[in-house]
Amino acid sequence: MQIKRTRPKPLRRKRKGRRQHVAIVHSLAAARAAVEAGRQRGMPVVLVSPPGAAAYLGVGFFAALVEAVRAEFPDAAVEAVMDCGDDPGFALSALRMGFKTVVLRGNPRARARVAAIARVIGADLLRAPPRVAAGRRGGEGKKGH
């Protein structure tokens, strides 16, 4: 009997032709505005946490923010990306909390280990967050934000 070695599947990549409304959000108000803008354009929405937000906002806070927006806009397609900076511990926490897309920079060996775990649970591990079009910073620069 021969043992077949399998290669790990590469991480899924977003199709380039798929248009999405991507916004970096710091608050519930900014997330609501981003989802509303995406709905008006007829696009799915990707809520991205600020760079390294896992360390200062917290994974739980951002997960609760996303769940609140999904509950408020049940008809909107909302995805979330948790930016964990260069801390693999926060990235593992985000995966445990159910995030399907996590950003992790830093040590390549640690990234490879976290990527293997993400792959097993069907999540994506990115080196950088999705690009945000100009003017879509989820409320930055507006009064009251």
Image (cartoon, grey):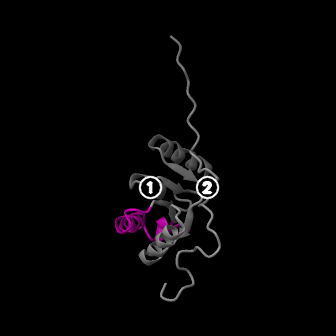
Query: Which residue is tagged 2?
Result: 127
For marks 2 and 1 on the same chain, the one whose residue lies earlier in the sequence: 1
Tell me where the magenta segment starts and ends, as one range: 48-76
Please tell me whether residue 134 is drawn above or below residue 4 in the rendered image.
below
Pinpoint residue 8: horizontal percent, then vertical percent: 56, 35
Name the residue located 56 percent from the left edge and 37 percent from the top edge. 9
Q: Which residue is mark 1?
A: 99
In which quarter of the view is residue 51 placed? bottom right
Judge the density around disc 2: few (<14), some (14-19), many (≥20) Cα neighbours within 10 Å: some
Residue 113: image tag: none
Residue at left offset 56%, top offset 65%: 22
Queried whether the magenta region covers residue 54, the answer comes back as yes
Q: Residue 18's quadrant in the figure?
A: bottom right
Percent of width and height locating residue 66? 41, 65
Amino acid carrying label 2: it is: Arg
* Mark 1: amino acid: Phe
